Structure formats: C-alpha cells, structure tokens
Image (cartoon, grey):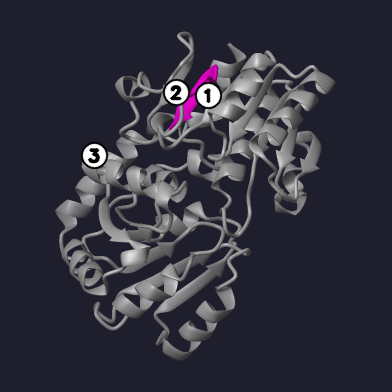
C-alpha cells in the first residue's frame, strides 16, 4: 500500500491532485495498491476510480500534529510501505512526526522554505538543483528528483510532439488552472482584445470548478466580437494547446503541459508559490514573465504581448527551450525511483 496525502479545490487548484492521480496510476500498473487521503472524491474522474483501493475525504485541515498522526495511523493500519505528500502546509513538525514513527515518504516541494526529512524530494522547478537543496535536506541519503524532467503530466501530454511555430500568431491561449482564476482571464481579455489585430482569436480554457465561469461567459457574449472561444473543462486539453500559437497562463502545472507542446509562454503569477517557478522559467529563456496578478499592469502586458506576436524568432526560441526542459516523462522517472 502507498498512501497519498494532498488537497484540491477551487481555491487551491487541482495541480496537486492531478499529479498524484497520475503517479498512482503508474504505481497501480506496477501492482501497488494506493490510498488517497484529502480531497473530495467528486474531483476524481469516474474513469480513474480503479486507481485507488480506498479514498478518505478530509473536509477540514486540522493542526499539523493531528494530520501527521492521522497519516501515521493509516500507515500502520495498512502496513503501507510509503507515503506521498503533496501539500505545501507540511512543515518540519509534520515531517518529524512521520520520521520518528518510522514512516518512509516522498515529498513534493516548491519553496525551499522548510527543512526536509523526506526519503525522496521532488521539485520540477527549472532552478531546483542539488546545491540549493543541500541547505534544507536533513537526511544524507535523501533522493533528490529535481528539475522539469520530473514534472508529472496528464497522459495526453506525454504523447505530444512539440508544435511547429507559425509565422503569424492566429490564436492566443489563456488558461489559469482548473480552479479559481481570481479574475485573471477577464483582466487579460479586457487588456488585449481591443489592442491586438482583429485577426487574432482568443481561446479561453477554464476548469468546471472556477466560480467565475458565468461572469466570463457573460462578458464574452457582450464584448467578445466573435473572437473569443471558451472551453469549460474540455475532454482533450492537449489538442487545444496545439491549436494555439501563444499562451498566457499561470505558473502552476499548466506551464509544464504547455512546455511539452512546444507552446511559447507568457506567465502571470496568481499565487505566491508561483513566483519562483515563473522567474525560473524566465531565467532559463523558456518563458516571459509578465508580472503578478495583484499588481497587474495592462500597459506592460499589451507591450509585452505585442512584441512577442511580431517576433517569430523569439517565439521559436521560447518554445524550443521549454520543450527541451520538459519531455513529459516525469511520472515514469519518479515511479522507477520509488519502485527501485
């Protein structure tokens, strides 16, 4: 038995859950029984119900100590061989409870904020490296799985070849994860729709759990001028990515998906934990950072997008570097590490 602990919802988003489900899918194919603790089971697609032998929804996060002890209880109950932790609220106190109880675990990290006692540490940030993690890793034999190579993508993105860059930008993709976009979609549409050439279309992809979907639809109906297509929770996301020439997206897991498709990216942070990843992608020359949502500058966005739209060489450079960083096989690499 391998136990997963994560959370998901409109405010938190669904990146944590998506990668846990994918990792559990691969582990189950290798005859490992998996249990999920945390999210509401309504967020698990019916087609994936076979992956978990048990699912325990946790309505409210208690104290760090309470939650850690709950994990220890289920580890002992099921004689679990490992725990997968994908929640950034897990601090050193939480980890030490697991360590002192003899629990072995893999931990997804994104911040380098807390000391890490995990047996495996995963961080897909382009700037995550061993030298930086030496400052926080406390176990000498911890296995570090660092960089975009270890990004876990949904199945459809593992099968894609990077797109060829069109000389002309015909369609711009706008996407801010599966949860609350926090107003970013409308801010971008309002800033760009009237400023870019009328030939450019916009494709908005939004999750079914985004509470702003109705207001987005109403605004587009009144102001979209037949230039904006809205897709709510589409069945095939990768094909939509491949239909676009440029992406304006948030700094979560969607970045790795766009990178695997060879899609030029412009990134806006809608949460604090996206700041470092976005800057890392920009530093690597694989994306352009256009700021934070809480200090949104429509004039800077217009200028930045307009420059990229007319610069095919820049778009080619962005796409090439991004696709080289993320080959989409991270789930296989992590599964092999765990099973070995």
Task: Please state the horizontal and vertical placement of residue 129, each as a whole percent of the image.
Answer: 33, 25
Q: CA distance from mark 3 to mark 2?
A: 19 Å
* Disc number placed over residue 334 in the picture, else none: 1
Task: Verify whether residue 6 appears in magenta.
Answer: no
216 horizontally vs 48: left or right: left
Sequence order check, earlier mark of 1 and 3 = 3
* Disc number placed over residue 227 in the picture, else none: none
Q: Which residue is more in the foreground, 187 or 150?
A: 187
Task: Please state the horizontal and vertical placement of residue 62, each as a whole percent of the image.
Answer: 70, 43
Task: Please state the horizontal and vertical placement of residue 232, each as a whole percent of the image.
Answer: 58, 67
Q: Do tag 3 and tag 2 residues touch (Cβ < 8 Å)?
A: no
Q: Residue at x 51, y 78 (%)?
A: 216
Provide the residue span drawn in magenta: 116-123
Q: Quadrant of residue 169?
A: bottom left
Number of residues whose C-alpha sits closer than 10 Å to that of mark 3, classed few (under 14), some (14–19) or many (20 or more): some
Q: Which residue is mark 2?
A: 145
* Disc number placed over residue 284 in the picture, else none: 3
Q: Quadrant of residue 289?
A: bottom left
Q: CA distance from mark 2 to mark 1?
A: 7 Å
Q: Residue at x 26, y 44 (%)?
A: 286
């Amino acid at each position: 038995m391998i136990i997963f602990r994560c959370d998901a919802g409109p405010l938190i988003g669904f990146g944590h859950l998506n990668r846990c489900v994918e990792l559990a899918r691969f582990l189950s194919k290798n005859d490992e029984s998996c249990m999920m603790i945390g999210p509401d089971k309504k967020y698990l697609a019916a087609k994936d119900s076979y992956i978990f032998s048990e699912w325990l929804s946790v309505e409210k996060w208690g104290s760090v100590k309470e939650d850690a002890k709950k994990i220890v209880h289920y580890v002992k109950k099921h004689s679990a061989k490992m725990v997968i932790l994908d929640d950034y609220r897990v601090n050193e106190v939480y980890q030490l409870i697991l360590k002192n109880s003899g629990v072995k675990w893999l931990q997804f990290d994104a911040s380098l904020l807390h000391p890490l006692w995990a047996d495996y540490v995963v961080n897909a940030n382009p700037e995550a490296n061993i030298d930086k993690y030496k400052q926080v890793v406390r176990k000498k034999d911890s296995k570090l799985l660092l960089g975009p190579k270890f990004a876990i993508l949904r199945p459809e993105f593992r099968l894609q070849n990077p797109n060829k860059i069109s000389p002309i930008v015909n369609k711009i993709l706008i996407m801010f994860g599966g949860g609350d976009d926090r107003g970013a979609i409308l801010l971008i549409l309002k800033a760009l729709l009237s400023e870019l050439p009328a030939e450019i279309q916009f494709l908005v992809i939004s999750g079914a759990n985004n509470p702003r979907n109705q207001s987005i639809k109403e605004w587009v109906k009144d102001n979209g001028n037949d230039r904006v297509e809205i897709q709510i929770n589409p069945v095939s996301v990768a094909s939509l990515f491949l239909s676009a020439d440029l992406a304006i997206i948030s700094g979560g897991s969607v970045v790795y998906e766009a990178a695997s498709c060879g899609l030029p990216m412009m990134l806006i942070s809608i949460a604090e934990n996206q700041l470092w990843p976005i800057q890392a992608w920009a530093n690597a020359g694989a994306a352009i950072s256009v700021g934070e949502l809480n200090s949104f500058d429509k004039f800077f966005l217009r200028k930045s997008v307009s420059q990229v739209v007319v610069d095919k060489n820049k778009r080619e450079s962005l796409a090439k570097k991004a696709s080289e960083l993320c080959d989409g096989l991270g789930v296989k690499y992590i599964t092999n590490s765990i099973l070995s």
